[in-house]
Amino acid sequence: MDFKKGEAFYKMKDNNTVLVTLMNSKTDFEIANTFNWYRIPVKSAPLIVKNKSIKYIAFYHTSIFESLKYSIKYYAFVKNVTIKKRKELLPDLLMDPKADNEYYKIEFGPLISLPHEIFSLRNRRILFIPTTEEKFFNANEINYLFHNSPLEDLLWAKFISKNISAERQYLITIDKKNFLLDFALLCKTRNIDIECDGDRFHTNFNAVQYDKRRSNLLEKEGWSVLRFTTEDLHLNFDNSMNVIYQTINKYGGMQEIGNTNLFRYISPDDERQLKLFD
């Protein structure tokens, strides 16, 4: 997974009380609906579970659920979080090689239907989405849920105003390793990864080395990587956006949602600004 970005990351995480988690098994959904609990491996559990700040749990359904696929419809109020072994949770699987593995057992009240489903317009994969109650109960599309850093929210608001269909915290796998891209822009000839680097964290030597290795892997897989610092996005915001617009246009324009054959070029905010590729 990616490193956490910037000191503001931790402050924003303190506000997260809702966890959207993956529901990719009809058996697990039956357990959630009938017995009101869900399990998450201890080794991969997000912070919101480990520190027990989780207040609500919600479920993102995969394609096996047909009419519910790639959407969030159900959530529940969390009552208790404990650690159990797999064989305690699923006693019928005592001979399973994972029987002694530890899981967080999240117990909750009855499932509640959202008044409106939260969809993924691109049918994307997720792992976990920790978020705030405000974002969760007001979102109608999955990208509005993410609550990672003020820098990302600033950039996301600009993308919305420019009708740029970015994907936030976009999950990709390279060499069996998972990476979450702050923003993925899907373009005609080359996709773009945009990273918002909080200065305090990303000036750390180990973090710089990690970022370089990560960028090299992405470039190898055909991604173009743009990284922006706090200064770039606060003091030079217009210039930074112009770099993004130019890069989108260089790679054939943004792919329109719902049509993989249609791409749209982006107009700069100010045609007089110096263009990156002039």
Image: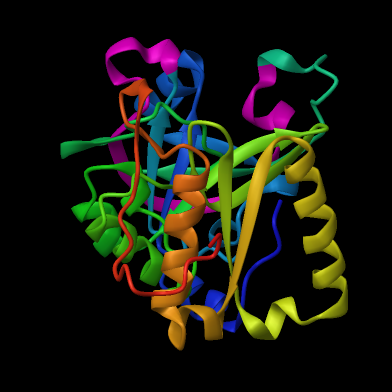
Q: Where does the image place residue 248, in percent across and percent down from the top left?
A: 46, 48
Q: Residue furthest left?
A: 115
Q: Left or right? Give the position of 224 relative to 247.
A: right
178 sits left or right of 148 in the view:
right
Using the rendered view, name the quadrant where residue 76 is placed: top left
Q: Quadrant of residue 3?
A: bottom right
Q: Residue furthest front?
A: 278
Closer to the camera in the image, 27 or 154:
154
Of residues 198 and 97, the one drawn nearer to the viewer in this rendering: 198
Residue situated in front as seen by the camera: 97 or 187: 187
| Region rendered in magenta | 63-91
Say if residue 110 shows up in the picture: no
Q: Is residue 94 visible?
A: yes
Q: Is residue 36 magenta?
A: no
Query: Residue at position x 51%, y 18% from top?
Result: 25
Q: Position of residue 161 (x, y in %)?
A: 23, 60
207 or 139, nearer to the observer? 207
| Quarter where residue 156 is shown | bottom left
Look at the image and say whether residue 81 sits in the magenta stretch: yes
Q: Residue at x 78, y 18 (%)?
A: 94
Q: Residue at x 87, y 72 (%)?
A: 206
Q: Position of residue 224 (x, y in %)?
A: 64, 48
The image's colour scheme reads rainbow
Q: Is residue 250 above or below residue 92?
A: below
Tell how many labels.
0
User: Relative to 179, is 252 above or below?
Assistant: above
Q: Position of residue 53 (x, y in %)?
A: 48, 66
